[in-house]
Image (tube, rainbow, N blue to C red):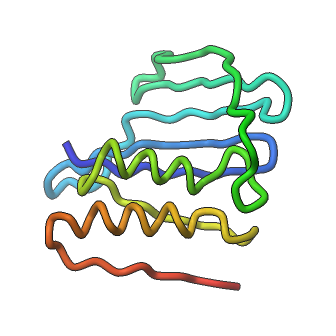
């Protein structure tokens, strides 16, 4: 199944949605959720398309050094996703903060190019 992950990262929460690409029918949302409490005690909540709770738990975040002034780092997240999902991953970075995410997008590009598919990075600035 091919999917699209949409992430909206704020200063104290991250909201996400996962859409399935269903043939010619378009997109179908099948998971949505959020991580709130960032900076204190983070809580992950996710629900399926029928509003059934899939996950509702607290967890601890990475306490390693910041990368590009950010922790958790978008670069680290994208690099990990590229390693796990390889050419099946599509990365979209919407950010106006700093350089965090650029190296991760390069890792996604490298993973996608491993299939020989043409691909380019597109950068938008304000």
Q: In the image shown, does 95 or 61 lie closer to the viewer?
A: 61
The relative height of residue 37 versus residue 28 in the rendered view (above or below) is above
* Location of residue 111 with respect to 62 vertically, above or below: below
Quadrant showing the C terminus: bottom right
Q: Nearer the viewer, residue 12 or 72?
A: 72
Does residue 74 lie above or below 106 as drawn? above
Could you tell whether 46 is left or right of 1 in the image? right
Q: What residue is drawn where x is 37% and y is 52%?
A: 82
Residue 32 versus residue 78: which sits nearer the camera? 78
Residue 125: image location, x then y, percent: 65, 84
The picture places residue 89, in percent across and down from the top left corner, at: 32, 54
Residue found 50% across the figure and 35% down from its top: 32
Q: Nearer the viewer, residue 3 or 38?
A: 38
**Quarter of the picture holding the N terminus:** top left
Q: Quadrant of residue 75?
A: bottom right
Q: Is residue 116 left or right of residue 43?
A: left
Task: Using the rendered view, name the quadrant where residue 42 is placed.
Answer: top right
């Amino acid at each position: 199944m091919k999917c699209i992950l949409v992430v909206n990262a704020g200063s104290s929460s991250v909201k996400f949605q996962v859409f399935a690409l269903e043939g010619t029918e378009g997109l179908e949302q099948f998971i949505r959720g959020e991580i709130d409490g960032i900076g204190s005690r983070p809580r992950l909540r996710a629900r399926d398309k029928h509003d059934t709770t899939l996950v509702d738990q607290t967890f601890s975040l990475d306490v390693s050094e910041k990368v590009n002034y950010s922790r958790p780092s978008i670069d680290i997240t994208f690099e990990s996703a590229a390693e796990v999902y390889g050419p099946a991953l599509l990365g979209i970075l919407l950010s106006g903060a700093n350089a965090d995410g650029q190296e991760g997008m390069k890792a996604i590009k490298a993973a996608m190019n491993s299939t020989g598919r043409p691909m380019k990075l597109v950068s938008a600035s304000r």
